Amino acid sequence: MKILVCISHVPDTTSKINFIDNNTKFDTNGVQFIIGPYDDYALARAVELKESSGATITVINVGLVDTEPTIRKALAIGADDAIRVNAEPTDSFFVASQIAEQAKAGGYDLILMGRESIDYNSGAVHGIVGELLGVPSISPVMKLDIEGNTAKLAREIEGGKEYMEVSLPFVAGCQEPIAEWKIPNMRGIMSARTKPLKVVEPSTVDSGVKLQKFELPPAKGSVKMIPADNVQELVNLLKNEAKVL
Amino acid sequence: MNILVFVESAEGKIKKNSLEAVAFAQAMGGSVTALALGNVEISELEGLGKYGAKKVLHAADEKLNQGVIQAYAAVIAKAFQDENSDVLVLSDSSLGTPVGARVAAKLGASLASNVVELPNTSAGFNVKRSIYTGKAFAHVELTKPKKVIGIKKNAAEVKEVGGNVSVTPYQASLSDADFSTKITSAEKATGDVLLPEANIVVSGGRGMKGPEHWSGIEELAKTLGAATGCSKPVSDMGWRPHHEHVGQTGVKVAPQLYIAIGISGAIQHLAGVNSSKCIVVINKDADAPFFKAADYGIVGDAFDILPKLNEAIKAAK
Ligand SMILES: Cc1cc2nc3c(=O)[nH]c(=O)nc-3n(C[C@H](O)[C@H](O)[C@H](O)COP(=O)(O)OP(=O)(O)OC[C@H]3O[C@@H](n4cnc5c(N)ncnc54)[C@H](O)[C@@H]3O)c2cc1C
């Protein structure tokens, strides 16, 4: 089985978000980048499948050269080789088109990624890749088992889950608890250095989405503290001041 | 401008977030057509007129009773073309978001999800969307003639603007290939208030010490008509079901009131609650980071405060 895992390179979840250049560019100053947490679940599940049934894993990232440490980390976790599409990942359609093109060429049985990236949160790449390849796309997937040519999945829905079966190939947007995040071990880190990382140039795509500017939400006002022995006061404030009761 | 709205349903009833999508489309101006799939009660469909739908299409084929992403995308894209639509509006949800993506790719449309307010069309077609899990916004221009927008909860206020409309059956041409995903069963928490749609959320963290103490949270939620939520470690440890996990990697909520009990307020948790209108934090540690993100706070023991708060709210009702 050949698995393609798509990873985003995103600011660490504790990052302070700031913008520069007149609010048109993300400020990377002091920001740590990581594999998108949802993509990390997808990768972890792929590694489990590899361990249980002997798959090969290719990771793909659409990004400029600064994403290579993130890609190497995925190789250290257990992917066998990597593709970097050398372009700024501007929007879902652009990224999905690049992935679909590589996926077509590689002939994968399974394409896994996170349900969404944690920078743009679009949650669209799996759907677009599925559509461009003409295969099913399922998201958010919280359980994935493969038996022969069939997969059994659970998808999260509001207040519950849905169980389903689908034949390979297909695309899945993953989330927990599909697997537990894996931490690379020393051997993985050493071998990742020499695993193949292919760099390809992007194809031209018009997504019809143009960034104008970024904006930060207004700062939160300060908290009003209420003594623990006066919950009545809290109820009054919720009712009369905040007007939420 | 012709606007098509995909409305979701559950057990025959239109979902609240879909009413917001209809209200959003109505407020955009133009002619609003709503499209519902599968089993939905006729009175529910007619009632969409009250929120601004001029026309309601119903694809009632029983194969559409289940939300198969690929099949839904095919039907919606076809209706979009049949209706000469310019914009598709849907609400972001576990079904809406993945379906919207496929529809956009099928139509060659510009796509934006997590839209938080009405588009600005004074020059071009510009939308404001939430990014970095609620920590920022992006203003983007959608330049293609066809557009698909997914709206975030609270992007529009649901209000009655008209009366019932009659329902037009929509003959969807279904292809077997679009149903290759077979939904075999579903598990749903019935009777409870659904977390992503709730107006009030009562949420517990590791400070609750164990699943056996959740009755205090459940009782308060019941008094308030609220949904229950939790932090990630709580669902990781199996104290609560996974679909209650709030935060960066869980459900993002946007209620009127979020009450956090025994949750420290890690930045990953805050990412899922920062769209709440009002946040109350109860924590025994005065230095818990959650207080910085709160509107009201009480430093104290949850087990002491929960029953008192429940009584006080009951009395105030
Ligand atoms: C990539 C990533 C993604 C993550 N995503 C999420 C996410 O989506 N959602 C999420 O919640 N977390 C997430 N986390 C985890 C997050 O960092 C925190 O570990 C987690 O939110 C802590 O949960 P907690 O507040 O319940 O527990 P703790 O941090 O242990 O806090 C417990 C709190 O309870 C208080 N307390 C204890 N006893 C009492 C009492 N008797 N009365 C009142 N208060 C009491 C304590 O003072 C403390 O503040 C993520 C982490 C990572 C790295």
Image: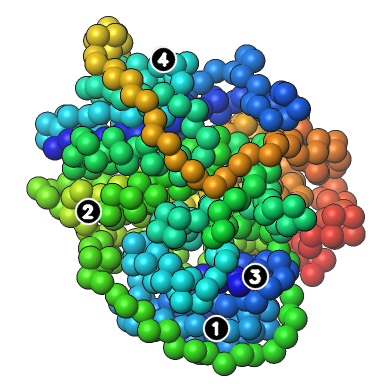
Query: Can residue B209 be seen in this snapshot?
Result: no
What is the quadrant of residue A120 in the picture? Answer: top right
| Image spot of residue B206 (x, y percent) | 55, 37
The residue carrying mark 1 is: B56
The amino acid marked with disc number 2 is Lys
The residue carrying mark 2 is: A152
Q: CA distance from mark 2 to mark 4?
A: 33 Å
Q: CA distance from mark 4 to mark 3?
A: 47 Å
Does label 1 point to a residue whose CB lies under 8 Å from ligand 1?
no
Q: Are marks 1 and 4 in contact (CB under 8 Å)?
A: no
| Image spot of residue A48 (x, y percent) | 22, 33
The residue carrying mark 4 is: A69
Does label 2 point to a residue whose CB lies under 8 Å from ligand 1?
no
Q: Compared to A82, does A2 lie above or below? A: below
Q: Compared to B44, does A168 lie above or below? A: above
State whether discs 3 and 1 lie on one chain.
yes
Q: CA distance from mark 3 to mark 2?
A: 42 Å
Does label 3 point to a residue whose CB lies under 8 Å from ligand 1?
no
Question: Looking at the image, which is closer to me, B286 or A189?
Answer: A189
State whether discs 2 and 4 lie on one chain.
yes
* In this rendering, the label closer to the viewer, 3 or 2: 3
Of the numbered discs 3 and 1, the one sitting upstream in the chain is 3
The residue carrying mark 3 is: B1
Q: Secondary structure at mark 2?
A: strand
